[in-house]
Image (spheres, grey):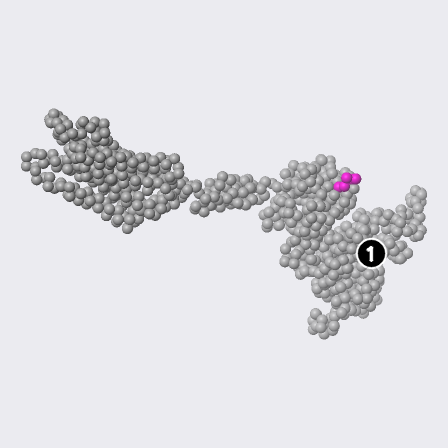
Amino acid sequence: MRASPDMYLSVILFSSFSALSTSSSSSCELLAPFNVNSIYKAGDFVLGGLLPIHYSPVFPELTFTSKQQEPTCTGEAQAMAFAVDEINGNPSLLPNVTLGYSIYDICIMLGVGFRAALSLISGREEQFQSNETSCVGSPPVLGVVSASSTNSIAVSSILGLYRVPMVSPGATCACLSDRNQFPSFFRTIPSDAFQVQAMLQIMRRFGWTWFGLVIIDNDYGHSAARSFRSEVERSGLTCLAYVQVLPTDGDPAELKRIVTVMKTSTARVVIAFGYDNHMVKLLEEVVKQDVAGLQWMASEGWSTYTVLQTPAFMPYLRGTLGIAIRRGEIPGLKDFLLKTHPDHHPDKRRENNLVKQFWEHTFQCKFAPLPPAWVDAGGRVCTGQEDLGTAETPLPEVSDLRYEYNVYKAVYALAHALHDMLQCVPGRGPFTGHSCASSQKIQPWQLVYYLEKVNFTTSFGDEVSFDENGDPIPIYDVMNWVWLPDGSVKVQNVGVVKKSASGDDELILDGDTIFWSFESTKPPQSVCSESCSPGTWKNRRKGEPVCCFDCNACSEGEISNQTDSTVCISCPEDFWSNPQHDHCVPKSVEYLSYHEPLGISLTTIALLGTFMCAIVLGIFVYHRDTPMVRANNSELSFQLLLSLKLCFMCSLLFIGRPRLWTCQLRHAIFGISFVLCVSCILVKTMVVLAVFKASKPGGADIMKWFSAMQQRGTVLVLTSIQAIICIAWLVSASPTPHKNTQYLSDTIVYECEVGSTVGFAVLLGYIGLLALLSFVLAFMARNLPDNFNEAKLITFSMLIFCAVWIAFIPAYISSPGKYADVVEVFAILASSFGLLVALFGPKCYIMLLKPERNTKKAIMGRGASTT
């Protein structure tokens, strides 16, 4: 449960009124001493320390006396003491000034931290002199080095009222960056906001988008949860499968429920924000339910703690990745720690008993007076002659310091700020009237000013400075838990994450050295849904996180060429999607080609018709003097054969890829060729009728209108009309090649647009008109008395011609793509063959197979007998 601001204020007011009283003897007197473990050293200026040394205090009547048990965090207090001694021995930093320290053991308890903070800012002595008749003077401590997030939030709310600077080596809560609430707070450890970003960087490196979050129920955990939710919502690249809060009382039922959630979730990555004592209880339940196969990510609160590296836990924690406080070295600390001795810290009013406790725990002895129970048990007496150099001490490894290194930097930050303040030249100061702070009466807010501008480099090479929020240059080590074959555990450094000069987060990771707990020895997969491959798009599942989606295939003509694409893009007009829908390919091209079977067949038939026309022409030329040829108007027959040859040949213009000249010529030559052909037939029909009329009395004059010259002129005029129609069509709206991409979605159909539908209709209509006229005239002359009546053949041929072209119109309109050209070519060839066979087939049959019937007598005689 987190304390509210009202509760903080109540404690502040109560403590302030109860801590001091003003006597009439112009002195300030503490109402009662604060009996708690502490270490004190006098100095010109004193720095306060609120650091955890024991975990479990007892509370006899508000005395807040720590239980005499194993010190757990002695290194932090010792690092602060060493830093102060080192500064005092440094002639270039705070010369002629002696620093002191007053370090309290706050036992990781909020109440103890409150009381200790008030004790620091109100003074340590039961009675001390003040100026004149009021409690005014330099503050008992200039600055405070604080501990965890929860204690720092609480204590800083007190110290911030008086602008007493606080520098924390371990408070990571992002909320402490709020300058309005915590105006005098600084820290040498990055905030959880950066720790969260660092973890997300690692997750993105390994493609983990689906994870669970377990937090402790305090400011540290809840701040991390808020940061994670904010980053997840902002980026949309990762998703939270669940958020579980560890119970502070270790409720077994609640722990069981939390582990069950972890076990049943599809998320294989679990990020745990907590401390080692909280994680122990959680992992005991993990072992009980045998939840293996999880990839753990540890916050800096437990990533380097050995209490969890046990044979029972390591089958589940091996391969853990963790964020750790930046490692550092403090030269000379080991020698300082080995010089620790009770004689160097006289036990004055219980202020330095921590050294005694440390000595008694290390050597398993007791100083006099001995407790009766200790005497009865045969316990050993401490002589003070024991040697720390040969003892198994709980002293930190000075070459691998993390939290202690941050304490060291915090003390030096306060010292550098004080040094800069004391170096101020009067008249050039930063305060009102360019004044400087008085060394006899320093105000805490003045030190805050200089602390904001601190910038120095430690002996380890780390730069120390603070931004406008009191945060340091962010940097973390990335740790990996390696379970060695002999059962031992090695926590190795596999990378670093820091803020680059450009302001971006930079992750440097040695992936080859990372130990993974999985059989594949590769990073696990932790996704709600597998990535959508190219050719598909992500369709988010309704009501679920953005990382949970279905992969839907792109539609025809659309592609996605990236993994996890959210949309499919349409291919350009001349392209189409490949079968995998991951890239566009040129559309297939369709037209009536010479290389395809249909085109080859039509070309062969057209050439065959042309060849047959040539043969028939040759037969007629060879038999040009026979009655059969002479009686059927040989000149018109020759013209008709030539026009039929052109009709067969023009069909070839409809085969092959349409081009501008082929589109313009195909219909023009087709129209002119067929008009020429039908004109010859029409004139032949008219000549037949004229000959019959001339054979009757009074009809001799009619033949003067059908001389050879007039026949040629009639054919020429009728053909010229079609030529004029074609020229007008080509000039006004010429046919052009066209890429039709609408009919077939995956195919470009090359075709000739007629340009003007009216022009095309007039061309066909004129041919139809002449053909209909020829048919009517031939039908009228079909029963003329003649042994070889050509009008019957013309009637039959025109019937075939008209039937073909009447069927052509609906077939042409309904035929798609290249098949429209096929229909037109088929109509040309069918009508041409119909005319060739109907008109010349019987004649060639007589000339070649029945030569006895190719005589004038046979032709005329047969005609007489029929009458």
> From this viewpoint, which residue is outermost toward the left?
698
**Residue closer to the observer: 33 or 795:** 795
Q: Is residue 11 visible?
A: no
**Residue closer to the observer: 407 or 607:** 607
Is the magenta region chiefly helix, strand or loop? loop
Say whether residue 151 is left or right of residue 741.
right
Q: Position of residue 297 (x, y in %)?
A: 69, 45
SS for dot 1: helix
Q: Looking at the image, which residue is at 23% across and 48% down?
A: 724
Q: Looking at the image, which residue is at 64% across and 47% down?
A: 205
Q: Position of residue 121 (x, y in %)?
A: 78, 60
Residue 8 painted magenta: no
Q: Position of residue 163 (x, y in %)?
A: 72, 62
Task: State which region is magenta.
Answer: 483-487
Label 1 belongs to which residue?
A: 333
Residue 485 painted magenta: yes
Say whether residue 439 is left or right of residue 619.
right
